[in-house]
Amino acid sequence: MPAKPTICVYCGSSPGAKPAYQQAADTLGRTIATRGARLIYGAGDAGLMGATAQGALDAGGEVIGVVPGVLTTHEGKTDPRTTLIRTETMHERKKVMFANADAFIVLPGGPGTLDETIETLTWRQLGIHALPLVFVDTDGYWSRLLKLFEHFTAEGFMHERFNSFYSVAKTPEEAVDIALG
């Protein structure tokens, strides 16, 4: 039997300003589980990360959390049903998440989410991988970043092919459909 596909989710450790963000995170986790995929994420029960993991667990899904020692106290405890991988550094955390992923989905988040996302897209640009990355554009959250990508291209700092390295979904369900191809 083939292994379950694993979807890495990048998202905020805060709930965000709109209830729609929490709902999207819960729906994403549930959808990943019900579509037969496994979730890998940054661990912890806080914010959108916690809502995504809880949604997956509540739907009977398999969840892998990856947490560096420095964040153990910041991101809260992790549900005991989660397989927890501890790393020494943030760089190692990103490496473990990347190495175990078959696709990436990006929910709203802040600088950490953006860091993970841009690094994954840069690795795609460099030919390190060809895995799908999907932004869930809940309430237009990512629209300004996508406009910035257009600006980078127009100003000659980013090749237009970069825009083919990601997809944009309006709903978590659509994002999972795209990620699982």
Image (spheres, rainbow, N blue to C red):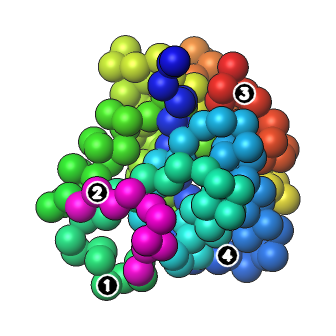
The residue that disc 4 covers is 16
Quick one: quadrant of the C terminus?
Answer: top right
Q: Secondary structure at mark 2?
A: strand
Q: Amino acid at mark 3?
A: Ile
Q: Residues within 10 Å of mark 2 (few under 14, many from 20)?
A: some
Could you tell me how far apart the alpha carbons at marks 3 and 1 are, in whole angstroms? 34 Å
Q: Secondary structure at mark 4?
A: loop
Q: Which mark is residue 85?
A: 2
Q: Residues within 10 Å of mark 4 (few under 14, many from 20)?
A: some
Q: Are marks 2 and 1 in contact (CB under 8 Å)?
A: no
Could you tell me how far apart the alpha carbons at marks 4 and 2 are, in whole angstroms? 26 Å
Ranked by sequence position, the earlier of labels 2 and 3 is: 2
Residue 69, horizontal then vertical, whole percent:
21, 71
Q: Which mark is residue 89?
A: none
Q: Residue at x 24, y 61 (%)?
A: 86
Judged by its main secondary structure, the magenta piece is loop
Q: Which mark is residue 73?
A: 1
Q: Which mark is residue 178?
A: 3
Q: Are marks 4 and 2 in contact (CB under 8 Å)?
A: no
Q: Amino acid at mark 4?
A: Gly
Q: Does residue 146 appear in the picture of this structure?
A: no
Q: Residue at x 72, y 36 (%)?
A: 35
Q: Nearer the viewer, mark 3 or mark 4?
A: 3
Left/right of residue 74 with respect to residue 92 in the rendered view: right
Left/right of residue 18 with respect to residue 51 in the rendered view: right
Could you tell me how far apart the alpha carbons at marks 1 and 4 are, in whole angstroms? 20 Å
Ranked by sequence position, the earlier of labels 1 and 4 is: 4
Q: Which residues are magenta?
A: 77-86
